[in-house]
Image (cartoon, rainbow, N blue to C red):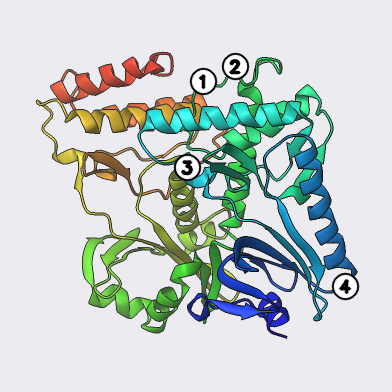
Amino acid sequence: MALLQYLQHGIDEKDLPQTAAGLTITAVLRWLPGSRLVVDGYWNGQPVVAKLFCPGSKGKRAQRKEVRGLQAIAKCNVHCPAIKDVLTLDEGIHLLVMEKLEGETALRYCLQGSRAQRRSRIHRLACWVREVQQKGVVQTDIHPGNFFFTAGGWALLDAAECRFGSPTPVRAKANLAALLAQFPPLDLPDVRDCFAELGEYQGALRVARRRRYQMILKKALRPCTEFAAFRQGDVRGMCRRELLPQVEALLARGLDDVMQTTDSLKLGGASTVVRDGQSGWVIKRYNIKSFVHRIKRQWGATRAQKAWLGGVFLREVGVQTPLPVAYLEERRHGLRHRAWIINAYQSGRGLDELSPEQAPPEPVVLSLQDYFLLMAQLGFQHGDMKSTNILVCNDRISVIDLDAFNPFPRDPEASYRKDYNRFMRNWPKGSVLRTSLERAIAEAGLSDHNQGV
């Protein structure tokens, strides 16, 4: 019954390796409780990847779909794992044993090395995916984890989610754009040659990106693999799942006690900021200033939630910002009260500490160029571009104070100009620092966005 227990309840990594029904499990790759378990291991002494499906007709159909998909992919002369064995075990579990490919997923391979190397790898992947489409295979669950780079080139995984036959140009373009949207925007190469027969692709890429970012932000507000919901007394919120025990320990100490007994970074009417001595986290509490202020809090997202989503968004698109740990909201008698955002501590100095009569270091300038390029491409808005909200950390900028962040403003160009204007007003007009930044951002191809500033 061991494999059935693993399928239903999972396997603790510290208990591996485990052997059952002739399969030695060395690592868990994916687990869908009670439905599917994907593992690394050994079968008849050979390294394999095995998929275990639940007993019954549902598991049998899933196994059959995977097998037929692998067979169809191979017939189209597309590289995929070879089938080693297909059987139903005594426990009723349906087992598929496949060749273990040597290499790494596109998720890892394409995000390593210099930017030039990353762009080259993403370009090769995009061209290969287009070739696969032309051979009549379309991976509908198109994420980088389903493509594997080996010494012999790219291979396709997760055959159950593949569709066969020549896709229409519109579907092929949308499919390829959905893959590219999952990479950091500044890592994307010029892929016009991959879309040569499909026409202009920037529109499809914008749609795919927006859909992806909206999905990620929705996931950050509900329990999923990456995030967990919690509730303790009047306080509820979301946190990173791997940090849930530490967040619960912090709550057990009492948020008010923590705020009073730790190092204060900012004391004010609207908010209070401290650094917790035990966890090292920075905690920002949004205070209630008046009865009217409390009434206004009942509509729309709280500033804590905006900061939480802003951190998730910026890290997704490749902007350095402190790791968002959790956001919390206090509710009393069904009404919102105070709120908190918790971030990992980020050391560094603010841009306000740079001399206005000296040009900033080149790495800082390049990092700011990247930030404004992303702002122009993706259309997000920080909302409070004070120099104190931009830290310099190891010659890169880190963006903080995200409680006015808006990932999808109604007028992205107006929002960009507003952020740009506020940013430049940090220094006197004509100063060396401001002039050098204006020139650098314009040289990045953003002069049109900066018109009227």
- The relative height of residue 387 versus residue 18 in the rendered view (above or below) is above
SS of the residue under disc 4: loop
User: Residue pushed farthest front?
Assistant: 45
Q: CA distance from mark 2 to mark 4?
A: 47 Å
Name the residue tied to disc 1: 190
Q: SS for tag 2? A: loop
Residue position marked by numbered label 3 in the rendering = 109
Choose the circle earlier in sequence order: 2 or 4. Answer: 4
Q: Residues within 10 Å of mark 3 (few under 14, many from 20)?
A: some
Residue 198 position in % (x across, y down) = 71, 18
Image quarter where the C terminus lies is top left
Could you give the CA–CA distance between mark 4 and mark 3, rounded to whole angstroms? 38 Å
Q: Quadrant of the N terminus?
A: bottom right
Amino acid tagged 4:
Gly
Horizontally, residue 135 falls left or right of residue 453, namely right
Q: CA distance from mark 3 to mark 1?
A: 19 Å
Image spot of residue 321 (x, y percent)? 36, 48
> In this image, 138 relative to 259: left or right?
right
Q: Which residue is identified by label 2?
A: 193
**Residue furthest out toward the right:** 57
The residue labelled by disc 4 is 56
**Residue 116 seen in this snapshot:** yes
Query: Could you classify mark 1 by the number of other residues whose Cα lies within 10 Å: few (under 14), some (14-19), or many (20 or more)?
Result: few
Q: Which mark sits nearer the N-terminus, 2 or 3? A: 3
Q: Gap between marks 2 and 1, in whole Å?
A: 8 Å
